[in-house]
Image: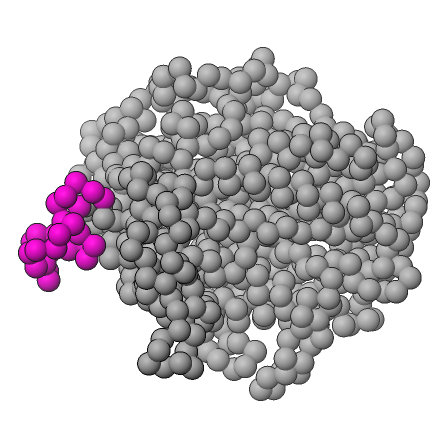
Amino acid sequence: MTLKNLLGCGLLLLLTVATACNACNPPFNPEPRANQPNVKWCPGSPGCLTTGKGQIRAGVGKRDVTPRGFEIPNVNYLVSTACDPVMTSRYRAGRCGELREDPRDCGVDGLCRNDPGWTAGEPSEGDGVDDWFLDCGLDRLCPGNTPETDDPSTPAVDESADGVDNDADGAIDDGPYPGPDEGENDRQFQAVWIAGFGNSRPALGVYDPVQVRCMALNTNQTTAVVCSLDAVGFFYDEVERARALFRERHRELDLDYLAVASTHTHESVDTMGQWGHANPIPITPGRLEGHNAYIVDQIVEAAAEAVSTLEPARLVLARTSSGRGGFLRDLRDPQIYDDEMLVMEARAAETDRPIFTAVNWGNHPEILGDANSLISSDYPHALRRAIEQGLPATGSKPALAGRGGVAIYLNGAVGGLMSPLGVEFQGRDGTEYPPSQETFARMEAYGENLAELALTALSDEANLETVEEAELKVKAERFFIPVVNRVFIFAFAAGLFDRLVFDEQNGEPIDTENTSLLEVTGSAQTETFTLEAGPWAILGVPGELFPESAVGGYDGTRTLGLPIIKSDYCPPQESCRAESADDPCPTQKPDGGYTDCECEKCRLCAPPDLATAPAGPYLKEKLGGRFNMVLGLANDELGYLVPPWQFKVSETAPYFCDAEDHYEETNSTGPFAIPRIEGALQKLFDFAL
C-alpha cells in the first residue's frame, strides 16, 4: 500500500508546516471504549444454536469483477518505455505505466514546444482540448473509427478476430463506429486507475480476469463464507454493504458469517480511491464510478452460490514450505519469514470430487511492477489456473494433474515488507528470471511454481489429514482503531476514501466534510475474526500483518539463512544526501529537526532493538489448531500493521517523511493498530463456545 506516494511532493509542501505542529498530531486516548459492540458468535447465537460435531458441508462460488467499459490514455503521454512485449504487441503501445506528472495540450504525439523531436503544425496542439486521453466513451470507439477487418492483401489474416489492437485505438477487434456512448466527448477521463504503486497509472486493457471466489463451510446450524477478492484492498464499509445486501436479497439462505479478504494485487482497479490522477496531488477518488457497487453485488452472488451448493464433504489438509530462495524477499529488517503454505481442499463425501482448493501463503502480488498497464490479478491468477488445470511435463519436471473444482488464493502475512520484487528464480521449464524482470512471463512462471508446491503437498498422502465431522466455530469482534496518520485523515476529508471516521467515545461518525483537517481526530471501525473446524483454524486481520506478529522469530529461527539485521543497516553519515540534489545534507536545525526528508531519514537511522520485541506466544500459536491460517486484508485494508516496538516516524513531518527502513509507518493508521487487533483477537481466543 503506497498512500504516501498518492500525495507526493505537492501535498508535502502544502502541509509540512501544519504536520509539524502539535495540533496536527493531537494526543489520542489509546484505551479502547469498554462497550464496543461484538458481532455474532456461532454456535450459541440465535439461528446457530446447535453445538457439537456434525457432518462438514462445503460449497463454492465465483464471479468475474473485471471492469470492461473504460476510456484509455493516449500512450504518448505515458512515461515508461519498459513495457512488456505482450502489451506492446496487443495494444501497439510503446509506452506504459504512469501518466506524465503534468499532461499538456500538446497534440496526439505528446510532444510540446521545446521537447526533443517536436515539430510544428499538429492540428490538435494548443486547441484547448485534452490530448492525453482518448475521449471516446466506454466502448473506446470515436467518430471516424476504422474497423479492424480482413486485410484484402493478406486474406489469411483476419484482423477482426486476432486479439490484437491492430489500428492502435485501444479497442481490440472492433467494428464500425456505433455512435456516441456514455462519457464520450465530455472532456472527462473515465479511466480505470490501476492501484498498488504510484498514482496516475491508467489501464490500457485486461490481461487476465479479476474475480471474487468464495468458499462456504457448514456444520449443524452454523454456516460461514470466506471470499477472496482480486483487489488491492476493500474497506470494511463495503463488506458491511455486502452483508446487508445478502440479507436483503437472499433471505432464504442461512448464512451466519461472511468474510471478504483481498488478494492485494497491485495490478487491478483502484477499489480504495487513493490511486487516481495526481496533478500534482489527487483531488478526486481513483475509483471507477459504480464499480465498487458492482463488486459488492458480485460478492453477494458468489457467496449465495457457495451457500446454495453446500454438500457433504471432507476437508483434506496439507502443509509445505516455500523457502525464501526464488519466492520471498523481506524488504524491511528484522529478516523474519513465514514461508509456510497451507492447503485445504474440500472434497465431496460421496465422489471425492474436489469442490474447492484453498491455498494460504503470504506475499505481495506485485510481480508486474509499476510499468504494467493491463489489469491483472498478478500471480494468484497463474496459481489458481495451474491448480485447477494442472501443469505439463517440462524439462526435468513431471506433469502434475489439476484438481478441478475452484482454486482460491488466501493471502497471508504480507507486511513488513514481503515481496517477490528483486527475487531471482527459475521457471519449471528451466527459464531463468532475473530480479529486474517484471513481465507477464515471469508472473506466470512464479504462480506456477507456487502451484507446484501446493499440488505436490496434496499428492503426499502420508502427510495429509482428513476431517469429515467437526464443529464449525465462528467468532468475530468489531472494534475501533485510532487514525493518527494525517495523510489518511486528508484522504478521509477529501473524499478519496469512501468510509466513515468515528468518534469512538460516543460511537458516532464524524462529519469530516465540515471539520478542519487540523481538528479531525477519529477512529476507523473494523473487525477481526476466527473460524475453526477440527484441526483447521483461520484468523482474519484487517490489513497487512507483519510475519513477526504471526510467528515471532525474533530469536533468529525464522530468518531462513539471513542475518536477522543486516550489518550495513544504516548508511555512513558522510553518504547522507539531500532529497533533491547531490549535495550533502544541511546542518541539523537548532530545534533538532531537519529541512529535508532524505537527510532526516539518513541522520536518524537506528537498527531495530530486538531486546524490545515482545515474547510469544504469537498469533498463529494462539489459534490452537494444527493447520493454522492467517488471512491478511480480511474485511478491511488499514495499511501496514506495524508492531509498536518497531514503530518510528519522522520527527519533523510525521507520516509524510519516513525514517530509515520505516516506510510502512507512513502507510499505517498509526501505532495503535496492532495492540487493538491483538486485544480483539485475544478476546476471541479466550471466549469458549
Percent across and percent down for residue 481 are 55, 28
Q: Can residue 106 be spotted in the picture? A: no
Percent across and percent down for residue 599 are 25, 43
Magenta span includes 666: no
Residue at image coords 32%, 65% = 167
User: In the image, is residue 261 above or below residue 420?
Assistant: above
User: In the image, is residue 579 above or below residue 14?
Assistant: below
Q: Nearer the viewer, residue 115 or 506?
A: 115
Residue at image coords 88%, 65% = 351
Percent across and percent down for residue 273 are 44, 38
Total numbered circles: 0
Please name the colour scheme applied to the rendered image. Answer: one colour
Q: Nearer the viewer, residue 669 or 448?
A: 448
Rendering quarter of residue 682: top right
Q: What is the magenta range?
A: 105-130
Percent across and percent down for residue 5 are 35, 43
Q: Can residue 139 be spotted in the picture? A: yes
Magenta span includes 117: yes
| Drawn side of residue 405 relative to residue 500, left or right | right
User: In the image, is residue 342 above or below residue 297?
Assistant: below
| Drawn side of residue 647 relative to residue 389, left or right | left
Residue at image coords 23%, 39% = 596
Residue at image coords 40%, 35% = 285
The quarter of the picture where the N terminus appears is: top left
